[in-house]
Image: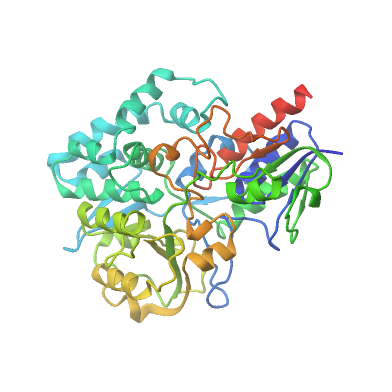
């Protein structure tokens, strides 16, 4: 009998398996698709030689993850590559605010009226970032806080809505960039704890940047799988699990799946019926005949580019997708330019480009024209660079990754109390009513992103149970 079976070979499932195998437990991973990776995969979606990331592409939480930093993943091929700027936010007038590794450079891009306010906001937390990140991403009850005072101060700033935090800024440049940071979790700007969301992304950039993985996000998953195999674990692909009886006998079963799928497979009935799924996204991967022709110089050297004219436009787009059930006329866009840091992702002189906008959960329309009209506002002539495009709305995203219910790439609404208390309000979020069944996906704390911490935290709950039995 195995000690543990993990269902789902995404970053969290693989991390959970690694953490258990490191502690001497026998582990096997079962993945429904024919390749591992989940939200961290790389494929030729458009033309031969163009390597795209179907989901996550830039990894501010990955490079800052306490779990990943404790593992020897670089020995298994994982290499982080950085653009000159982690992120840029261009404006219609051809200028841009930036999120730089340097706090001073970032503050200067906001203008003199907000530079000091930004430095005062981030500097106290940046000094304690590694401890803060570990405490923040390990909660709840997986480890005692190492610095409870700093964590409490962060809570005072981060738990209110981001609209409260943005009152510190007087000009629109800083407000717009910060609103864009909040929108990475597809949460309305006035939602609970959204100030903390924006602050975490900013601090992560200052601490270690927003890199891409050399060769694509698949490198993250491949490194975890290779390390797991060296530890004696096994990975089985093309193995769909419909019920627990489909799996070999084990002392524990760990699910890197949606709560909906877990309840169905493990026979948990209506246990997760109150779990909410959030807006979906409409994503386009482009093969380009050269770089994106951004008007703002800063955007030409940034790994990630946020696109929204001001905080009001961003807020309107988020409300449309999350509360009003419609696709925004001017979607807020998050785009990634992997070729800026990793030219090998495309043939010489060409580039891959990744962009998405928010849409209602399960939306079946086509946002291509609206996305490209937005891009043309900030990069005139963009369409002339397009060699090929691969589009994916909510139905296609859900078909590629069953965890993205209705196209929700966060695997659950990151709004209200569910931003922090996932998948149910509980002091033991990784446990289920079945004593041998656990959840480790992005539907559990600390939530979405390629960081492995949900798997890391769940593995702690599993090995504590295994040692007791």
Q: Decide if residue 279 is on the left or right side of residue 310.
A: right
Q: Residue at image x 61%, y 39%?
A: 455
Asked where in the image residue 208 lies, by quadrant, the reply is: top left
Viewer can see residue 109: no
In the figure, 334 relative to 433: above or below? below
Camera-side residue of 436 and 186:
436
The colour scheme applied to this rendered structure is rainbow
Asked where in the image residue 47 lies, by quadrant, the reply is: bottom right
Q: Residue at image x 57%, y 71%?
A: 44
Task: Please state, as top left, top right, bottom left or bottom right, where the C terminus lies in the image.
Answer: top right
Viewer can see residue 322: yes
Q: Position of residue 121 (x, y in %)?
A: 26, 32
Q: Decide if residue 121 is on the left or right side of residue 237.
A: left
Q: Residue at image x 69%, y 41%?
A: 254
Asked where in the image residue 252 lies, by quadrant, the reply is: top right
| Furthest-right residue in this view | 1
Q: Position of residue 323 (x, y in %)?
A: 33, 54
Q: Position of residue 193 (x, y in %)?
A: 35, 36
Camera-side residue of 155 and 380:
155
Q: Position of residue 210 (x, y in %)?
A: 43, 48
In the figure, 372 relative to 252: above or below? below
Task: Please state, as top left, top right, bottom left or bottom right, where the N terminus lies in the image.
Answer: top right
Q: How many marks?
A: 0
């Amino acid at each position: 009998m195995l000690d543990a079976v993990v269902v789902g070979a995404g970053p969290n499932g693989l991390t959970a398996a690694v953490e258990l195998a490191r502690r001497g437990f026998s582990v096997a991973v079962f993945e429904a698709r024919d390749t591992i990776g989940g939200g961290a995969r790389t494929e030729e979606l458009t033309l031969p030689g163009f390597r795209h990331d179907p989901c996550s592409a830039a990894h501010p939480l990955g490079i800052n993850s306490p779990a990943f930093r404790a593992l020897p993943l670089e020995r298994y091929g994982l290499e982080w590559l950085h653009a000159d700027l982690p992120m840029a936010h261009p404006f219609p007038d051809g200028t841009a605010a930036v999120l730089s590794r340097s706090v001073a450079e970032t503050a200067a891009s906001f203008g003199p009226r907000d530079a000091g306010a930004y430095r005062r906001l981030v500097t106290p937390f940046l000094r304690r970032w590694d401890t803060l990140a570990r405490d923040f991403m390990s909660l709840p009850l997986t480890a005692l806080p190492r610095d409870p005072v700093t964590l409490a101060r962060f809570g005072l700033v981060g738990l209110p809505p981001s609209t409260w935090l943005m009152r510190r800024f007087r000009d629109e440049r800083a407000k717009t960039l910060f609103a864009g940071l909040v929108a990475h979790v597809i949460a309305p700007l006035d939602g609970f704890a959204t100030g903390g969301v924006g602050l975490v992304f900013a601090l992560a950039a200052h601490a270690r940047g927003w890199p891409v993985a050399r060769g694509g996000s698949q490198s993250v998953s491949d490194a975890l799988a290779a390390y797991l195999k060296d530890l004696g674990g096994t990975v089985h692909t093309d193995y769909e699990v419909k019920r627990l009886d489909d799996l070999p006998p084990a002392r524990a079963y760990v699910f890197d799946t949606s709560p909906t799928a877990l309840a169905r497979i493990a026979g948990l009935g209506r246990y997760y019926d109150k779990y909410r799924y959030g807006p979906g996204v409409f994503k386009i991967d482009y093969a380009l005949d050269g770089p994106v022709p951004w008007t703002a110089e800063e955007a030409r050297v940034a790994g990630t580019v946020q696109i929204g004219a001001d905080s009001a436009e961003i807020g309107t787009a988020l409300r449309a997708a999350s509360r009003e059930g419609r696709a925004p006329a001017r979607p807020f866009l998050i785009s990634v330019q992997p070729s800026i840091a990793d030219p090998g992702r495309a043939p010489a002189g060409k580039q891959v480009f990744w962009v998405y906008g928010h849409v209602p959960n399960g939306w079946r329309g086509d946002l291509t024209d609206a996305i490209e009209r937005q891009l043309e506002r900030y990069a005139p002539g963009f369409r002339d660079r397009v060699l090929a495009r691969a589009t994916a709305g909510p139905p296609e995203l859900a078909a590629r990754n069953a965890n993205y219910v209705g196209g929700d790439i966060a695997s659950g609404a990151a709004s209200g109390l569910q931003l922090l208390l996932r998948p149910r309000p509980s002091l033991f979020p990784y446990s289920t009513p079945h004593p041998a069944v656990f959840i480790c996906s992005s539907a559990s704390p600390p939530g979405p992103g390629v960081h492995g911490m949900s798997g890391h935290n769940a593995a702690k709950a599993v090995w504590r149970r295994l040692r007791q039995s």
